[in-house]
Structures are given as structure tokens and as C-alpha cells.
Image (spheres, rainbow, N blue to C red):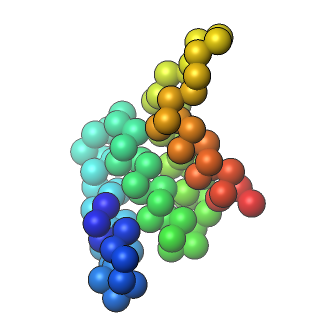
Amino acid sequence: KAIVLAPLPELRDLERASTYCRKAVDLTDAKDSYPLEIYAEVRGELGDKAGAVRAIEQALALLPEPKPGEPVSKRREALLQSLAKYRK
């Protein structure tokens, strides 16, 4: 995640981050939403909005839907916001 979010652009290595994130997704058999979330962020930063949307949708599918009357989790809300951003 640090490679993606480094405050100085010259410290970011998005291609390498994409490779590492994809490996993390593969190692977890895409059953952990966190690597998918970071992978989506990397894909979005690289301009691959479709790839970001796919990864976010996969991550959302792994998180439980809130029960009626319960609030949406902060994690789910963040993913939904990212999804809206990349669908523009």
C-alpha cells in the first residue's frame, strides 16, 4: 500500500504495486477484500477504471450486506465511494 500512497510521486511505483497486489489477490484466491481494495486503487491510479471497478465489485461481494436497519460498515462505504468514483 505504501508504494501506492506515497506522498511524493517519485516514490510511487504503480506498475510494481500492481504486480504485488495481483499476487496478493492470487495468493488469497481473491477471498480477502483488502488486497482487492488496494489492487483496485492501483488500477485506478494507472487509469484502468474498468479494472478498478471489477476489483471493487469482487471486494464488495466478499463483505456482508448490512441487515435492514443496520448501518453500512465503514469498509463497505469506502468501497462504494471508490466504485462511484471509478464509474464516472
Q: Which residue is at a point 25% across and 45% down the rendered structure image?
A: 27
Q: Residue furthest top?
A: 68
Left or right of 59? Residue 70 is right
Q: Nearer the viewer, residue 28 or 14?
A: 14
Q: Position of residue 87 (x, y in %)?
A: 71, 56
Please identify the quadrant where the N terminus is shown: bottom left
Q: Position of residue 23 (x, y in %)?
A: 28, 55
Please identify the quadrant where the C terminus is shown: bottom right
Left or right of 24? Residue 5 is right
Q: Which of the 4 image quarters holds residue 79?
A: top right
Q: Position of residue 60 (x, y in %)?
A: 53, 35
Q: Nearer the viewer, residue 71 or 23?
A: 71
Q: Residue furthest right?
A: 88
Q: Is residue 70 above or below residue 45?
A: above
Q: Is residue 24 visible?
A: yes
Q: Which residue is at a point 33% across and 74% down the rendered structure image?
A: 6
Q: Which residue is at a point 61% across and 63% down the rendered structure image?
A: 49
Q: Position of residue 74 (x, y in %)?
A: 49, 35
Q: Is residue 69 above or below residue 2?
A: above
Left or right of 84? Residue 24 is left
Q: Nearer the viewer, residue 6 or 15?
A: 6
Q: Residue furthest left?
A: 27
Q: Nearer the viewer, residue 77 or 63?
A: 77
Q: Which of the 4 image quarters holds residue 77?
A: top right
Q: Is residue 15 visible?
A: no
